[in-house]
Image: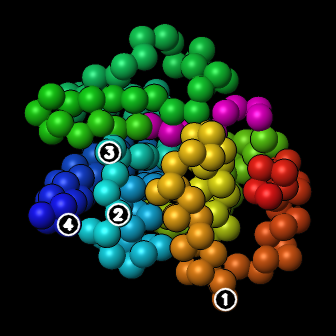
Amino acid sequence: NAYLMAVARSMKQEAVENEVVASLARKHVMVCLIKGNTIARIIYEDPNCRSSADIDLLVRTEDLAAADNLLKEMGFLRHESLPLNFVVGRLHHLVYSNEEKRIPMELHWDFGFPLYFNMTPADIWKGVTGNDRQGYSLTPENTMIMLLMHHFRHGFRELKILVDILWSFYRYDNVINWRDFAETLRKFGMVKTTV
């Protein structure tokens, strides 16, 4: 029963993801799905094996206002009422809800606390591949960094995130050059957090 409930939830989330991503693409807003169903598809190779409470979208900082406006047009209400130019340097995402769809949405421009690590939103987008037609995704290295920052942000207390990290090491074992990756972690000030 739990698995079937997860399947139903992930299918509903995927439908909403597709609708939102297509709408953003029509407005020329680059968007990359992160966490949730994307992690299930890429790392576990099963879209229904990992449930998620919300949908996480990554946009470029310069596209944040356009994405925010489009989500409002689609009936998503932003929980934070502060101006966008104020929250950009203080938060890493905004939360939206939609009464009809009943799936929370998070609009990210950063992976974690701004300025805590040396990785900027521009650095994050250097680790995004794809195009407008086929969609965008994180590189394996960026996926690992996102998961490590996510685990740090949740105080190292969520088993699900830890399992994602451990499974990612397995999935990317022959994909990521770990020596180069260690240098990237050093560059972004993430060695202690990773350890």
Mark whose residue sits in front, 4 or 1: 4
Q: Which residues are magenta?
A: 107-116
**For mark 2, does the 10 Å Cα neighbourhood hold few (<14), some (14 to 19), or many (20 or more) residues?**
some
Q: From this viewpoint, is residue 86 visible? A: yes
Q: In the image, 42: left or right of 37?
A: right
Label 2 vs label 1: CA separation? 23 Å
Q: Are marks 1 and 3 in contact (CB under 8 Å)?
A: no
Quadrant, the C terminus: bottom right
**For mark 4, does the 10 Å Cα neighbourhood hold few (<14), some (14 to 19), or many (20 or more) residues?**
few
**For mark 1, does the 10 Å Cα neighbourhood hold few (<14), some (14 to 19), or many (20 or more) residues?**
few
Q: In the image, 4: left or right of 14?
A: left
User: For mark 2, what is the residue?
Assistant: 50
Closest to the observer, 169 or 65:
169
- In the image, residue 125 lies at what x, y percent? 63, 53
Q: Is residue 11 above or below residue 106?
A: below
| Earlier-in-chain disc, 4 versus 2 | 4
User: For mark 4, what is the residue?
Assistant: 3
User: For mark 1, what is the residue?
Assistant: 174
User: For mark 3, what is the residue?
Assistant: 53
Direction bottom: furthest residue: 174
Quadrant, the N terminus: bottom left
- Residue at (15%, 39%) from the top-left corner? 101
Label 1 vs label 3: CA separation? 31 Å
Q: Is residue 73 above or below residue 16?
A: above
Q: In the image, 104: left or right of 157?
A: left
